[in-house]
Amino acid sequence: MEKKKVLVACGAGIATSTVVTNRVERILKENGINAEIEQIKISEAKGKQKGADLLVSTTILPTTYDIPVVIAVSYISGINQEGTDKKIIDALK
Amino acid sequence: MYFEDFLKPELIWTNSDASTHLEVFELIAAKAHKELFVEDNFLEKIKEREETFPTGLELEGYAVAIPHTDPECVKEQFIAVLTSKEGIPFKRMDDASKEVKANIIFMLGLNEPHSQLEVLQQLMGVLQNKETVEKLLSFDNESDILEYLKGVTK
């Protein structure tokens, strides 16, 4: 299976993206998806999307992207995290 | 580092009468600056980032906000806590066209990406737990908040 690349972004690239990165790592592993995850500031996403398969963000998107995007605020709020898990898995299958 | 290492007695406010998020930022930033936890540009940066990437979060029956900013602005890591019974308007993290009235604000002063996962997870656990949040809102003095938070994040 080819290796996927996932960008995980939040505003500062330091707080909420850390929590999200941890969860994304776990669910990808559980689902047997081989992926490299990079934690970034959302402002870097435009420049880093080339070669990436998915952008997962906790924050509003300042622009549009060429790759699929999943908003992962549920990992912070705790409400409907499983729905977000599914979106991420589906986007990488 | 543990959650309690991030809590600072001087960076906790209960029953704040602040009515805007800017007042909250000014209050916390002034104190954090006085204590030498942050660089001179911290207030400006945190305002700017909240404007671009808001941090209000609507949960079931209450709302929180977790303003934070670039690691370069933080000299010593901290999590500041401010409670408000009325709620302070913040734009929503996932939809800036909507506002929430945050009852608890956790301002995150972090400067080590990747290394503070456990502390952040404990914070998420706190803000996702309605009973914990209600308890925090019931306190009238700062030391009760400090002790309670230390207890629930052990």
Image: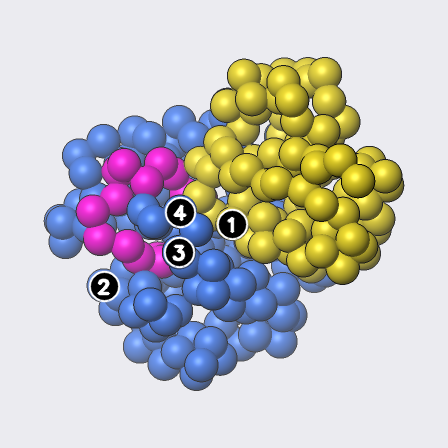
Q: CA distance from mark 2 to mark 4?
A: 24 Å
Q: Position of residue A32 (x, y in %)?
A: 78, 53
Earlier-in-chain disc, 2 versus 3 = 2
Q: Nearer the viewer, residue B83 or B111?
A: B111
Q: Which residue is mark 3?
A: B115
Please give the name of the residue rendered at 39% of the width and 78% of the height, measured from the top-left corner. B150
- Residue B79 part of the magenta segment: yes
Q: Which residues are magenta?
A: B67-80
**Could you tell me residue B112's position as x and y percent?**
34, 49
Return the x and y of residue B65 as percentages of the image width and height. Answer: 52, 49
Identify the residue position indicated by label 4 in the image.
B113
- Respond whether the residues carrying marks 1 and 3 are from the same subunit: no
Identify the colour of chain B in the image.
blue
In which quadrant of the rendered view does residue A14 lie?
Answer: top left
Q: Amino acid at mark 4?
A: Pro
The residue labelled by disc 2 is B10
Q: For residue B38, what is the image quadrant?
A: top left
Q: Residues within 10 Å of mark 2 (few under 14, many from 20)?
A: some
Residue at point 61%, 34% (across, down): A7
The CA distance from mark 3 to mark 4 is: 6 Å
Q: Quadrant of the N terminus of chain B?
A: bottom left
